[in-house]
Amino acid sequence: MSVETEQLTQNKVAVLDHGFLALDGALASDLAVVNGARVSFNSLADEMNEKDEGLIRFLMRERHGSPFEHGYFRFIVKAPIFVVREHHRHRAGHSYNEWSGRYSKMEAEFYVPDYVRTQVGKPGSYSFEPVEPDVREAAREEIRAITEQAFEAYERMLDQGVAKEVARMALPLALYTKYFWSCNPRSLMHFCSLRNSEHAQFEIREYAKAAEGFLERVMPVTHAAFVEQGRTAP
Ligand SMILES: Cc1cc2nc3c(=O)[nH]c(=O)nc-3n(C[C@H](O)[C@H](O)[C@H](O)COP(=O)(O)OP(=O)(O)OC[C@H]3O[C@@H](n4cnc5c(N)ncnc54)[C@H](O)[C@@H]3O)c2cc1C
């Protein structure tokens, strides 16, 4: 195993049944936030002190957001396509590059939900409750059967010489894909505030929880201030 691969394994969080979120690299720190703010007074610090922690809390509270943009997180994500559609709606300060189903064959890996739920309530105030065990097993079986059938159709078309970009049209939203995702701490906080939330769909929330865990690990003071401000990005 190469050093890079070993490092990646340590920074990898398993998400859903076959997915993951891995921190591939980070150039981010609480100190960079402090220095981004202190440059206004032509001063820079080499290490954090208590006053600097107060400064981060002040910046978060007053929503002075730009000092939180001097950082960079690069993740590798493996997620089902319906999660990716939600994730890639986050535009400001985010970059993505995804595995291409036009250029290479997709793999037969599909998400089969463990948490099968029913939707209760009205639009705008839905809540979700687990279904009965027999309904859950039947739903899981439906998803398993249709995804297997779809992948067989995909492979049949490829065998007959149909282009990958056409054959993939048979593949369902539960298919796993992989992509690079990079963002700055401010955009990461905005993503976490919207998606690590009880209003977000369970599946993307699992990814957002993992992402917030990395934010906390790399920028503990910033993360604590974010939580203190009700998890609203500055
Ligand atoms: C619970 C939930 C339910 C959702 N349901 C739906 C749905 O039913 N249908 C649907 O289509 N989407 C839905 N979304 C997606 C949502 O509308 C946003 O597209 C997504 O959350 C990204 O948020 P954002 O635009 O704030 O983030 P970003 O794209 O990262 O933008 C960050 C901020 O930059 C500013 N900004 C970015 N682009 C512009 C712009 N073009 N003009 C002005 N300001 C800009 C805004 O201040 C924005 O908040 C849902 C999201 C959530 C969390």
Image: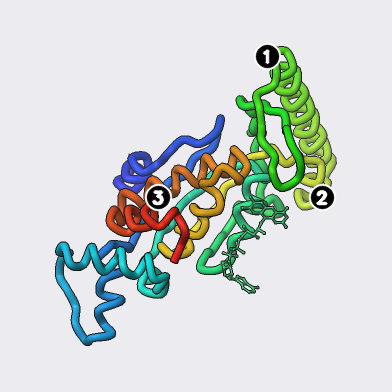
| Residue tagged 3 | 23
| Residue tagged 1 | 133
Q: Position of residue 185 (x, y in %)?
A: 41, 62
194 in relation to 142, above or below: below
Q: Quadrant of residue 160?
A: top right
Q: Position of residue 16 (x, y in %)?
A: 55, 33
Q: Residue at x 70, y 22 (%)?
A: 140
Q: Is residue 22 left or right of residue 136?
A: left
**What distance separates the C-alpha of mark 2 from that of mark 1?**
38 Å
Q: Is residue 183 left or right of residue 116?
A: left
Callout 3 amino acid: Leu
124 in relation to 97, above or below: above
Q: Quadrant of the C terminus?
A: bottom left
**What distance separates the C-alpha of mark 1 from that of mark 3?**
36 Å
| Front in this rendered view, residue 5 or 55 | 55
Q: Is residue 91 left or right of residue 23?
A: right
